[in-house]
Image (spheres, grey):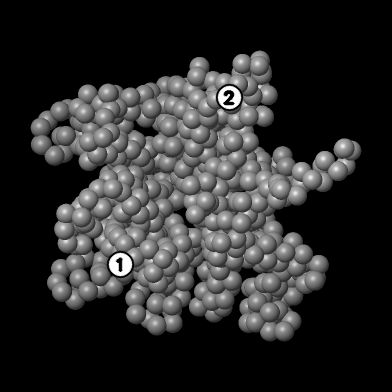
Amino acid sequence: MTDASSSTSEQVGYTKPRSQWWDVWDQFKTHKGAVMGAAFFIAVLIFVYVGPYIWTLDAQYIDIRARNQGPSLAHPMGADQLGRDMLARIMAGGRTSIAVGLTAMLLSLVVGTFVGVLAGYFRRVDGLLMRLTDLFLALPLLPLLLVIIMLFRDPLRATFGPEQGIFILIVFVIGITSWMQTARIVRGDVLALKEREFVLAARSIGTPPHRMILRHVLPNVLSPIMVSATLGIATAIITESALSFLGLGFPSDFPTWGRLLFDGTDWLQRNPERVIWPGLAISLTVLSVNYIGDGLRDALDPRIRGR
Amino acid sequence: MLTFTIRRLLMAIPTLLFISLIIFLILDLAPSDPTASLPLTIPPDVRADIRASLGLDEPIHIRFLLWLNQFFVNEPLNLLQHWTGWDLGGEGRTRVISWQTRSPVVDIIAQRMPQTLWVVGTSYIVGILIALPIGIYSAYRQYSIFDQAGTFVTMVGFSVPPFFSGVLVIVIFAVNLGWFPSVYDTTHVVVDWPSFVIQLKQMILPVMVLALQITSQISRFMRASMLDNLNQDYVRTARAKGLTETVVVMVHVLRNSMIPVVTVIALGVPQVFGGAIITEQVFKVNGLGHLLIGAIQGGDIPTVQTLTFIFAVLIVLFNLVADVLYGILDPRIRYD
């Protein structure tokens, strides 16, 4: 008997091996809202990142003769009070809003997972880290965000330039004020994982703590992390828009959806579409991300997946 | 339960002190100048005198202790004196003074509080009253058209930020239809029926915007909690005993499902104060959120410090309330 024939005879009885991610994908596909949300989110990404290559008008180009124009062929979404094209501005604003959402989510995820894993895995720091988490949860976040931004905006602008400075500041403040939920969930999961046999087995063969965390603990807490990632994007986009809306976010020549909405409210009676387009963009993006999160939560829950 | 409450209350004191220190440090480290908004013609030495009169030349720990003393000792004593009429010797006591208006911060907050409480409180109650039936019925008829529509609407309410929904209802109801005013007039006094109608009209839009958010959060919780309970064994037992469907759902299941929902409602109270900042800004409600924004923009540190601290107290307090309620309502939970 040769090796080749044995391997073919063995394969007859088996179906193709499936990883759990295929099951997750299958379950995810059954959630209509989630699939539509994902499709819409991808469409928004294409719109804001690829769109500028097709619609080549500059978002900063001032055409004063077109000011306050309604929708037309030259400006499908109209033009603002300086005659800047709204479609181009919505694309540019979306790039910033989504970049802020993704970066702030990543930051909060990294901090939250770090704190959660440390607190769950090492009993010595658990009490301290969880008190810290409780403390952050007790801080009144929106007022504090406003205060921090109001007070640190100018020095950061001076150091990193007007756009980079405010971007760093906003991502930083949103990131460090939204990691607490992730940390709590991850800690709970790590505490439960620590009691499982495979962790005991891994420890009994002398796995050092860092490899234990990276190889055995982290992959198993991936699903709650993914769900909080989607929700994190949604809250980050809303928070950034809220800050911009209160006039404490990005400057007007560096548009985000929130800033465009804020600028549009002054022209509400004349051109209501200047408020409606950015508002719709924020709401629909957040809605689609929330639906993705809903679908992911169902898909990653093994109790639901079997049904 | 009592020892748990007392222990948590005692633990809240260092937490709150630490929070107040953090807020104070953030405000102090930041390079903001309360005299920056004064006219440029003021000579530098006068400017320095103004800063000194605000107490800015003291070292930082003295200023922090001074604020603590003013906020935790002097202001409660003043309140006590005001309410009871006892003479507690109020002349020598310094109060927390706003840098913008030069009047005591606590008095300004007392002026602004009613507006916030009226608008936010009403919308919270309205939101809860709408959310509970929606949540109950969607769970009872899971996957029905009502449930699908309800879930979609709550998802939308969850995703549309108040600064968009607020502007949208202004466009629709105030600009196009002209039914309701877009600005909330805080000087309006209710004396008779017509003025009450005006008050009602101006409250509808902000209440609508806030209530949409609250409804969507709470009805999601209500639905999930009802669904958890509807599949339990005791529900089958209740049905097997021959109880009517109304009794099974509205008495057995509802009472058990309300446990987590009540705690969520308690936890949401301080959040509503925070979220109301934006709604108040949109409808120009002259409340606490409006005061905070103005104070932040004017570099008025005592007001910002006091207001943020009050928000923090509310959060800590309602966290405690939620935990205690959970323990009272659910006999399976025991804190020891």
Task: Left or right? Give the position of B220 relative to A89.
Answer: left
Residue at image position (82%, 41%) is: A6
Identity, as a three-letter code, of the amino acid under mark 1? Met
Q: Nearer the viewer, residue B53 or B271?
A: B271
Residue A160 appears in the figure: yes
Q: Which mark is residue A299?
A: none
Identity, as a three-letter code, of the amino acid under mark 2? Val
The secondary structure type at the circle numbered 2 is helix
Does residue B31 lie above or below B238 as drawn? above
Task: Left or right? Give the position of A298 relative to B240.
Answer: right
Residue B138 locus on image (x, y percent): 35, 64
Residue B202 locus on image (x, y percent): 31, 70
Q: Which mark is residue B203?
A: 1
What's the chain of the residue with tag 1? B
Quarter of the image that includes the N terminus of chain A: top right
Does residue B113 lie above or below B186 as drawn? above
Give the Cα separation between the discs numbered 1 and 2. 58 Å
Q: Please count the marks in the image.
A: 2
What's the chain of the residue with tag 2? A
Task: Left or right? Give the position of B10 relative to A245.
Answer: left
Residue at image position (63%, 54%) is: A25
Residue at image position (19%, 67%) is: B190
Q: Are marks 1 and 2 on the same chain?
A: no
Residue B186 appears in the figure: no
Q: Nearer the viewer, residue B42 or A35?
A: A35
Residue at image position (44%, 26%) is: A131
The secondary structure type at the circle numbered 1 is helix
Neighbour tally class for label 1: few under 14, some 14-19, many 20 plus, Cα within 10 Å: many
Q: Which mark is residue A199?
A: 2
Quadrant of the image occupied by residue A39: bottom right
Residue B56 locus on image (x, y percent): 47, 30
Residue B124 locus on image (x, y percent): 30, 57
